[in-house]
Image (spheres, rainbow, N blue to C red):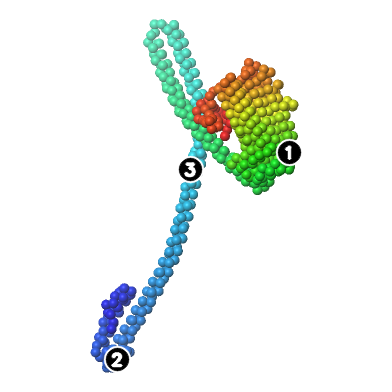
Amino acid sequence: MFKYKSFIGKIVKHADFLMLLTIIPVIISSLTCVRRDNPWDPINYIQTDACLPDSALTINFKTNALNLVSSAESLSTAAKRFNDTLSIDSILNKTIIDSNKNIASKNITMLKTNAVVDSLNRVQSIVDSLKLKSELSILLTNALSVSYIYDSAYYQINETLQKLYGTFIYSCPDNVSLIASFMDSVNDSLEAVDSIILLIKNRKNALSALIADSNAAYSIYNYRISLMNDTIKAYNDSINYLKQIQRYTQINTASDLQSSIGLAKAGDTLVLLQKNFVITTGGLSGFTNSGTSDSPIVIMGNPLDTTIISTVDGVVLSRNNYFVFRNITFTGSNNSGFKVSGSEGVKLDNCSFINNKLNGAEILDSKNIRMTDCKFLNNEKDGVRVSNSTDLNNQLWLTNVLVAKNKAYGLEIINTIIYGKNMTISNNGSSGVYIYTPSQYITIMQSLVTFNNGFGIYIPPQGEPLSIDNTSDIFGNTLGSISNDTIVSYSLRSVNPPYTDTLNNDFSIATGGLIDSLQQPPWEIIIGYRY
């Protein structure tokens, strides 16, 4: 027996409603066969014509039933397809989620890129303002010229007026009304001229204000460019170091360092991979090799992580020519941290000489020695000592060096020509610079010689030629600026430099004061050691 309600419920649930309307009459018609004489009932073999298996009613019922089955199968197929689609959509959803994550990451990157672009746009805006500056300067020059012309004309008219007035009074003393009329007419003209002059002056002041704004922008631009340049230099140094690691001899131990320096040939570069090279007996010395002016021997430390060479007796070059030491700190020696004797063409780049028992660096009878971007700090005697020069044409070049807190002189120079630029020589235990160089030239430019416990520059009474430019500053030394200033011609400044933090060896110039002002437009002069 059919469960009619359940069966109809399934049909309603799964079949198309129109098909259901078609089937219902067939079902109702077929129900007329379900009686006691149902021909399909096993106990009743009497059949009516309407309910015979081959009757039209029965065939119609079967046809519709098969159609219903077909519809159910179609529904099942469609359901399966939909389920498969859901499965595919699930994979797509995961793909979309991953894609969204990638897009989010790209968006973050784009935000950063936009920030960079925004910074570049701001810099471009500053550059544009700088372009405008030249135009403004021309306008201001013209305004000043016109203003001057009008001012001159104004005074000339006034002077002429007074003369005419005197002439009128002398010629027509009784014609008061004529004189008054004449004066009114001239005064009206002068007021018009005065108004024009006032307008020009106001425009000139506006132009001056615009130029002041562009100068401020110029200063910011220069500062940003200097930071960019410093960053680019650090990046280039690191890239260069990495290239050297791949291309040149790599040194990992102190013993390898000693032997490798001794075996190096002209043009060789030794790259120091370790941070610390400690030599507990003796020092680095006894070398017999040399480079050439075109192909020096280079010993290179890490520019980003200071390479330290600590020895008992220091590093010594004796008659070894054309060596370059770069990115190295020389410290802990019982003698001088670095010593050059009877040599030529030795260069020290970005090196530090700290806490040695004698001098930071000592140069004996050597020529064409160059020290660039170096620091000499807290040594027990001099920061740099140059002596025993038999050739009075020996030269020492000091560029961008910091010489501070050494117990004796900052620089002690004997019988050597000195060229010093961008030096900061400060807080040393004796005079900042001691010079004994008869008949030789000493040049000091854009340097700070300050707060030394003695003279800024001590010169014995022989009267050596000394040139100090007016961008150098000698200030705060306990015994005065220069010991022998009665016979030495020089031009310099004497102002208190605003150092950032001398207790922590930071001798950079803080914002404010004359020194900082000289480093801003329109001067743009770097004074002292630049970090």
Q: Quadrant of the C terminus?
A: top right
Dot label at residue 118: 3
| x then y, percent, for residue 171 | 44, 6
Q: Nearer the viewer, residue 360 or 22?
A: 360
Q: Nearer the viewer, residue 95 or 50?
A: 95
Which residue is identified by label 2?
Answer: 42
Going by the numbered disc 3, the residue's amino acid type is Asp
Mark in front: 2 vs 1: 1
| Spatial separation of the CA atoms under disc 2 and disc 1 | 124 Å
Quick check: marks 3 and 2 in contact, CB under 8 Å? no
State which tag comes first along the sequence, 3 or 1. 3
| Spatial separation of the CA atoms under disc 3 and disc 1 | 55 Å
Mark in front: 3 vs 2: 2
Q: Is residue 438 above or below residue 252?
A: above
Q: Disc count in the image? A: 3
Binning the other alpha carbons within 10 Å of mark 1 as few (below 14), some (14 to 19) or many (20 upward) gives some
Which residue is identified by label 1?
Answer: 287
